[in-house]
Amino acid sequence: MEWGSRVGIKRTIKQFVLRFDITRDSLSWLARRHCPILMYHRFGEGSREISAQTFACQLDVIKHSFNVLPLVEFCRQRREGRTDWRKCCVITVDDGYRDFYQIAYPALRERRLPATLFVTTGFLNREIWLWWDVIDYLVSTTALSSATLECGGKEIHLDLTTPQGRKSGWDAVASLCTRINNSDKQLILNRLAETLHVSVPQVPTERYASCSVEELKEMAEHEISFGPHSVNHPVLSRCEPDEWKREISDSRRHLSARAKGYVDVFAYPSGTKEDYNKGMEAFIESAGFDAAVAAHCDDFLNESQFCLRRCSPSRDLVDFLWTLNGGEYLRCRLSEPLKVMMRGLKHALFPRGKHAPSMNGSGEDRKTNAKGFKDATLL
């Protein structure tokens, strides 16, 4: 069957289920053990951003049909044993960009909806650049039409003549940076700047600006809370234990001291399954955090209070409603036993020491989302 036909059939099924109260309510009942935690990042008119109009539309849908819980209240109720989450959801936003204050916050305030902003504390008040923004700035401002980035004996060819070519170049470099440690990442960024003949300003420009502490204080008066998201936004699994512990502890200390409305919930930077581990979960639990959230929406069999799943809302209204009503959660839960069975079969057929083909193609393949990280949405 053609891929386009399969997508069309899936969409038709979603539309049918969502169209009628009885089928939509049945979907919500089947997914009643799941409370969608929505995860946004940037707002605006760019290709990687949620527009003000789309966000307002999504909030209107949520306001009409759902009970939006403050994140800390959801964590408390979950810890106390609540299991029926029908018609509930949580709204979160990562990183702390100023476009949250400019676009998302007014829409949330107008509808009196709570949300949690996870803040990269070193980024607050434009104190540092976020590393993927450095890549974006370099490929967007260079006057070159093409370039070749040499790194570790490999070459990344950059076609910079079109917006799509620049985006592809950004994807390639960002994907590489998620797989290396911080010192090697900085070397790559420095080499990219030299290759593209661009100097990075000391302070992030307006497009890449963060919220200020004063803006956090204002938002705290209107149901916006704030949680730590590390100091420098490294991929924690690429850090030594002392380093990732500092990133977690220092971001907690800095944010709790500077932001009214602080909530003791940590958000793993990048947050795919490969980007955090059980050791980090145990450390966060032992440090007394209320919870921690990841940035992927699968593997619910291993979900816990310290690796809560989140989903990236689709711009498409049908897919957004499907996720909000639990459709993607159910699809994932139904597919998980099959994946476990297939892994068992693979290990039986290919014992340790023998080469086994990947069930998902090359193990090095990484789809990229709005930051160049492995895709966290199932839409």
Image (spheres, rainbow, N blue to C red):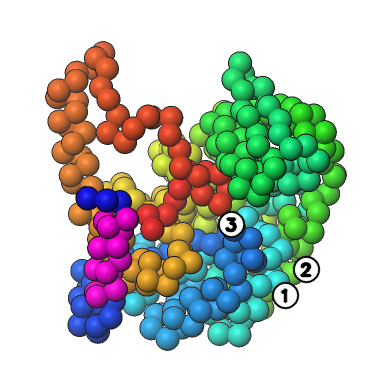
The answer to which image quadrant residue 353 occupies is top left
Give the structural element (helix, strand or loop) at label 3.
Answer: loop
Three-letter amino acid code at the position of disc 2:
Glu
- Residue 259 spot, x, y in % from top left: 69, 64
Tell me where residue 325 appears, x and y as whole percent: 32, 71
Residue to which mark 2 is pinned? 214
At 57% from the left and 66% from the top, the residue drawn is 50
Q: Nearer the viewer, mark 3 or mark 1?
A: 3
Front position in the image: 166 or 362: 166
Q: Quadrant of residue 199?
A: top right
Q: Are marks 2 and 1 in contact (CB under 8 Å)?
A: yes
Tell which of 279 and 299 is nearer to you.
Answer: 299
Residue 106 lies left or right of residue 22; in this view the side is: right
Q: Quadrant of the C terminus?
A: bottom left
- Is residue 96 rendered to the left or right of residue 58? right
Range shown magenta: 4-17
Q: Secondary structure at mark 1?
A: helix
Residue occupied by mark 3: 48
Asked if the residue at tag 1 contacts the one at tag 3, i.e. Cβ–Cβ closer than 8 Å, the answer is: no
Taking the spot 73% from the left edge, 55% from the top edge, the residue there is 208
Q: Which one is earlier in the sequence, the residue at label 3 or at label 1?
A: 3
Task: Assess disc 1: are there few (<14), some (14-19) or many (≥20) residues with their C-alpha within 10 Å of its C-alpha.
Answer: few
**Residue 259, disc:** none
Q: Measure how far apart labels 2 and 1 are at the Cα level.
A: 6 Å
